[in-house]
Image: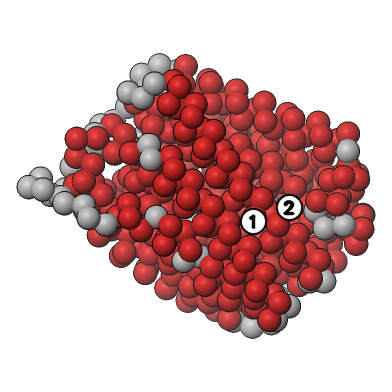
Amino acid sequence: MRSARTTMTGGTLVAAGMMGMNIAVYGFNVVSARLLVPKEFGALTALFGIILVGTVSALGLQAVTARRIAVDPDHADEIISATLRVTLMVAGLVGLVVAVATLGLTPALKLGSYWPVVLCGAALVPLTIMGAQCGIAQGLERWGALTAIYLGNGIGRLVGGTIGLAVSATPTGAMVGLAVGSWLPVLAGARLMMGRSPGTAVISRRPLLREALLSTHALLAYFVLSNMDSLIARNRFDEHDSGLYASGLILAKAALFFPQFVSVVLFPNLARATTHHARLRAVSLVVAFGSVAVAATAVLPKVALILVGGDQYAEITDRLWLFAVAGSSLAVVHLLVFDALARHAHGIVVMIWAAVAAVLASAYGLGVGITGLVITMATVSAVLALVVYLAPLPSREPPQH
């Protein structure tokens, strides 16, 4: 087991990499908010939601690969070889499914063309491969390589998306740039998947694929929960209010993404842990970061407004702290989901889908507006986090080869 000092050093490096990635992603969101009118920015935010939900397969592969390597390092090369075979199959399937889904998603999101959703599918192919690379780096605790992948993802989105908007200031232009830029992190992590010899003990793809599907299901439920409000806002609100809600989501996503390095760095420890100490430590760190985000937004709302798009979104200023609460609550849920995956405890998915149902019932049953929707997201996610944390932990299951 790695020393606490090594873990701290890795945590600092990965935190810097993820912060750089999130700053780049945030930067692209701000560029988009300033170059697009609220109507088009609301459409682009909904497309971001599709991509985030589509990356569940990548995160499922990442979690499974990292867990297997962390608890069985002697078979790392065999695990990586099996992961590569599964990843290529899953990446192609995910891209195709999302591209075909354009027939239903385009009218539902009030898009003027089928191309933006097709391009979402194209972007998800490299992003799925990136997920497997992150899992390899995470399981091997190759924090430098993981940092390079994260930075490549952020830079690819910022540079590619900005160039796309410069050529055509439309959601389609932005998505072309994102689809191209999404290959940069794959290039950054290519060495992790090259030159691996599986030796004589070849691992079957079937158990790995089964575990990946279970993890993907749990992550799909989580990403539906954490991104459904952007789709609800686009579907239920008028175009102006949808754009206002999208600007608030910039802050919510910042509060959600910033502490995610905690689950990344501590995931191998969570996978190997036999007590509750690692879990308590991780949750405490995420709660602390969330408290700082909410307090800063409440005290400095006008500064926060600058960060979410400027004066054209001034109507949302007094409600920005609510978005920080929602994002911070979802960050705790995110940590607890990955803790469950580290223990191979997939029963959490039932509780997440129940939370999704609660949000839908409130949004469509009560006819909530901007304030009501963000309060619903904050309340449901906070209650979910509490229930998951207090639920009895099942016994750990070993990986199957």
Residue at numbered disc 2? 250
Say the numbered circle drawn on residue 217: none
Kind of residue sitting beneath label 2: Ile
Disc 2 crowd, CA 10 A, few/some/many (<14, 14-19, 20+): many
Is 397 left or right of 31, judged from the image as shown? left
Q: Earlier in the sequence, mark 2 or mark 1?
A: 1
Say the numbered circle drawn on residue 25: 1
The secondary element bearing badge 2 is classed as helix
Q: Position of residue 43 (x, y in %)?
A: 71, 69
> Is any atom of residue 19 visible in this view?
yes
Is 88 left or right of 100, judged from the image as shown? left
> Is any atom of residue 232 visible in this view?
no
Q: Residue at x 70, y 57 (%)?
A: 27
Is 158 left or right of 122, judged from the image as shown? right
Q: Position of residue 285 (x, y in %)?
A: 60, 26
Disc 1 crowd, CA 10 A, few/some/many (<14, 14-19, 20+): many
Contact flag, marks 2 and 1 (Cβ < 8 Å): no
Q: Residue at x 69, y 32 (%)?
A: 290
